[in-house]
């Protein structure tokens, strides 16, 4: 399975696509002026406490106050649900507090913040107050999971927590220790800045997109093409720091010499355009109808032009299996979060239904965001949830139609006369 990363620089805008055997599976876009917010830490001030919601609003200097729920204020092991104290016992209006953004502002909602701090590194995630060791579920080898868990217990101090990332598999104790020490020093710097800061004030800003994609997405052997000389130099420095010896995987793409932009040369522009349509065609001739509402995402599967050769059940099953793989890819590409309902074509064989569920679950293992396949409802719909932390790239790539407002329908504006029949 060949993986390729394409990095396209256009002034302050940076766009990155990850291809798997030529098909886009991840897409990131960020402006240098805006940057990302998830992971940022702020010295904030409690503005309002709502005991009825067990939550508080925190001024961190953004347009809207951030939302702090009680579960993000106390450690999960600190109390059982029935023993939770009132939030009024924990925070008061005017109180200063160090918080971290865990979900960006979306729509009319402010950012969501937490006091369960985490600092991601190349090989592991450092959590200064978690007091446990976790290992990525994507590491299949039980012996390697046990090794990493033992290394984590050996390296961490009392009260500290670490999560071994997927890329930590096979890494030496020396590399893991170096990563942890660097993150531990960074946390000490955050505490120092926090003591000196006057709210609302940022004390730690998450890395820019270039560093994040190499830290979180790059894997050994992945080919990387960059069409901007300045960012190419930056990428060489980052790879030399994060994965020494991998600099040879970088290639500078010359758009002028190739007479095509990087994204056009690898078909990314065409793939993105197709992926964000309401109707998405499958290779076999079937298609998905993709509807985004404020509360959830609904996906309808149809056979379309695909007629099959071995009977109705086989045709439906093959279409559904293909749709399951495509749905997983599109959830990543569109960065959809929240509740997702997939209406697959009805199948009489319960075994086929289970195979479709397993196929979607298997395809979702590559997803960096937490994606859970909850199972079939009594009406035959498949329930899915996916963690959402950042704004989707869709609204940044497309503007809402001024005529229909995104509904696909436009009021004609002409009232039709209703002729009355003579009595």
Image (tube, rainbow, N blue to C red):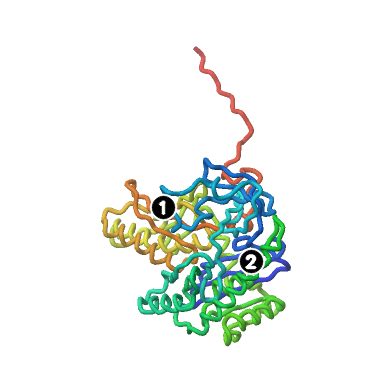
Task: Give the x, y percent position of residue 405.
Answer: 62, 44
Q: Which residue is mark 1?
A: 80
Q: Nearer the viewer, residue 66 or 10?
A: 66
Residue at the spot x=38%, y=53% of the render? Answer: 382
- Residue at the limit of the structure toward the top, as seen here: 423
Q: To which quarter of the image does residue 141 belong?
A: bottom left
Does residue 252 lie above or below 42 as drawn?
below
- Figure check: 240 above or below 412: below
- In the picture of the structure, the residue carrying the numbered disc 2 is 191
Q: What's the CA distance linking mark 2 and mark 1?
A: 29 Å
> Front-most of 383 and 403?
383
Q: Is residue 267 above or below residue 65?
A: below
Q: Secondary structure at mark 2?
A: helix
- For image coordinates 51% across by 74% down, the residue present is 124
From what the image shows, is residue 321 above or below residue 378? below
The N terminus sits in image quarter = bottom left
How far across and how far down the image is residue 144, in percent?
A: 39, 79
């Amino acid at each position: 399975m060949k993986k390729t990363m394409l990095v396209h620089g256009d002034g302050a805008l940076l766009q990155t696509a990850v291809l798997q055997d030529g098909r886009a599976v991840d897409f990131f876009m960020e402006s240098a002026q805006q940057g990302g917010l998830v992971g940022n830490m702020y010295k904030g001030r409690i503005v309002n406490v709502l005991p009825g919601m067990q939550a508080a609003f925190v001024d961190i200097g953004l347009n809207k106050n951030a939302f702090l729920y009680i579960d993000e204020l106390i450690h999960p092991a600190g109390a059982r649900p029935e023993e939770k104290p009132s939030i009024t016992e924990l925070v008061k209006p005017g109180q200063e507090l160090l918080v971290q953004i865990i979900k960006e502002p979306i729509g009319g909602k402010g950012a969501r913040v937490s006091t369960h701090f985490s600092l991601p590194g190349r090989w592991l995630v450092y959590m200064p107050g978690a007091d446990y060791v976790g290992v990525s579920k994507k590491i299949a080898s039980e012996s390697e999971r046990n090794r990493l868990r033992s290394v984590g217990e050996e390296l961490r101090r009392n009260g500290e927590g670490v999560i071994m990332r997927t890329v930590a598999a096979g890494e030496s104790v020396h590399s893991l220790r170096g990563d942890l020490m660097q993150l531990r020093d960074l946390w000490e710097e955050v505490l120092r800045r926090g003591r000196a800061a006057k709210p609302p004030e940022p004390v730690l800003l998450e890395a820019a997109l270039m560093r994040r994609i190499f830290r979180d997405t790059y894997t050994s052997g992945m080919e990387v093409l960059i069409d901007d000389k300045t960012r190419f130099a930056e990428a060489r420095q980052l790879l030399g720091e994060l994965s020494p010896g991998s600099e040879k995987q970088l290639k500078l793409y010359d758009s002028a010499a190739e007479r095509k932009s990087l994204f056009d040369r690898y078909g990314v522009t065409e793939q993105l355009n197709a992926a964000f349509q309401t109707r998405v065609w499958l290779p076999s001739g079937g298609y998905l109808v993709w509807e985004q509402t404020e509360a959830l995402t609904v996906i309808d599967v149809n056979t379309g032009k695909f007629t099959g050769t071995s009977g109705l059940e086989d045709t439906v099953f093959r279409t559904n299996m293909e749709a399951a793989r495509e749905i997983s890819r599109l959830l990543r590409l569109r960065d959809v979060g929240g509740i997702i309902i997939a209406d697959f074509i009805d199948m009489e064989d319960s075994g086929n239904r289970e195979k479709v569920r397993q196929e979607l679950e298997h395809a979702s293992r590559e997803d960096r965001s937490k994606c859970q396949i909850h199972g079939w409802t009594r009406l035959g719909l498949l329930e899915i949830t996916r963690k959402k932390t950042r704004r989707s790239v869709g609204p940044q790539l497309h503007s809402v139609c001024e005529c229909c407002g995104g509904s696909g329908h436009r009021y004609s504006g002409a009232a039709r006369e209703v002729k009355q029949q003579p009595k």
